[in-house]
Image: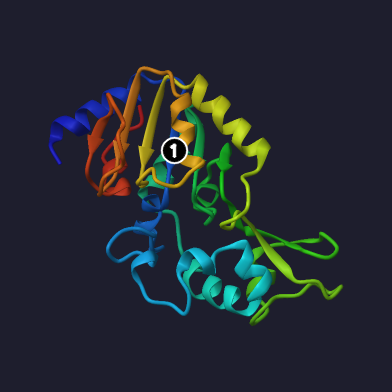
Amino acid sequence: MGDSNIEKLQEIVDRSRRLVFFGGAGVSTESGIPDFRSKDGLYNQKYKFPPEYMLSHSCFVDRTEDFYEFYRDKILAYEAKPNAAHLFLAELEKTGRLSAVVTQNIDGLHQAAGSKRVFELHGSVHRNYCTRCGKFFDLAAVKAQTGVPHCPCGGVIKPDVVLYGEGLDDDTVTGAIKAIAEADAMIIAGTSLTVYPAAGLIRYFRGRDLVVINLGDAGDVPGALFIHQKVGETLGQIKIK
């Protein structure tokens, strides 16, 4: 990665007053959480059923034990800690220049780093609810049980994450769109921009500066500054002034 790209990114961060960060799975790989579409990602591994099915509403309903076996083994990362990307964004938010984080991730690492305004498009593993009575549970309650977790009322506990076959939360999407539409700069990072409808939200950006940080391809983003490197490694070089 050339120093010139880092210098350009530094200039963009310095002049921005309403920056929005739009992140995908690649933001958390440096925290030890696997992504989905890289050569070592979940979609290129062998399972009893395809990962798209294992993480679907249908699997949760019809094969709940299989769903939770996969979910516990491949999705939950109890020991994961925020990396340089999460920490940078939390510090930038404190200056008032980062207006929002829009994330496709469900790991809660942005909040763990200290970010306050986070739009979690696909939900969070830290929120779980009983499908019978609606009572909410934190991740510790799910971790405390083995197999399929149950509420004291007997109902099955479901993660408050958006599974394949489910729709995004309207309020979350509305908030994310508003933040993106009002931004003067946006950093898109760690995503191949192939997961819709989330990836479609970037079309609402009308600001001046657009940056894409991703090891692999990230679709067609006209006018963007492309940095083909790890997200944390890149943002860790940016100084907050």
Quadrant (top left, top right, bottom left, bottom right) of the C terminus: top left
- Left or right? Give the position of 8 relative to 177: left
Residue 151, picture quadrant: bottom right
Closest to the observer, 20 or 241:
20
- Left or right? Give the position of 77 relative to 44: right
User: With respect to residue 79, does 167 lie above or below?
Assistant: above
Q: What residue lies at 85% left-to-right and 63% top-to-bottom?
A: 133
Q: Which residue lies under the disc numbered 1?
A: 22
Closest to the observer, 214 or 8:
214
User: With respect to residue 227, does 16 lie above or below?
Assistant: above
- Left or right? Give the position of 239 relative to 89: left
- Residue 64, x across and y down, in percent: 65, 75
Closest to the observer, 46 or 24:
46
- Residue 66, x across and y down, in percent: 58, 78
Q: Amino acid at mark 1?
A: Phe
- Residue 175, x across and y down, in percent: 61, 31
Q: What residue lies at 63% left-to-right and 79% top-to-bottom?
A: 65
State the count of labels. 1
Quadrant (top left, top right, bottom left, bottom right) of the N terminus: top left
Residue 97 visible here: no
- Residue 129, x across and y down, in percent: 74, 61
- Left or right? Give the position of 2 relative to 184: left
**Neighbourhood count class around disc 1 (C-alpha, 10 Å): few under 14, some 14–19, many 20 upward:** many
Residue 34, picture quadrant: bottom left
Residue 6 visible here: yes
Q: Helix or strand or loop: what does disc 1 sit on?
A: strand
Q: What residue lies at 50% left-to-right and 39% top-to-bottom?
A: 102
Q: What residue lies at 38% left-to-right and 43% top-to-bottom?
A: 193
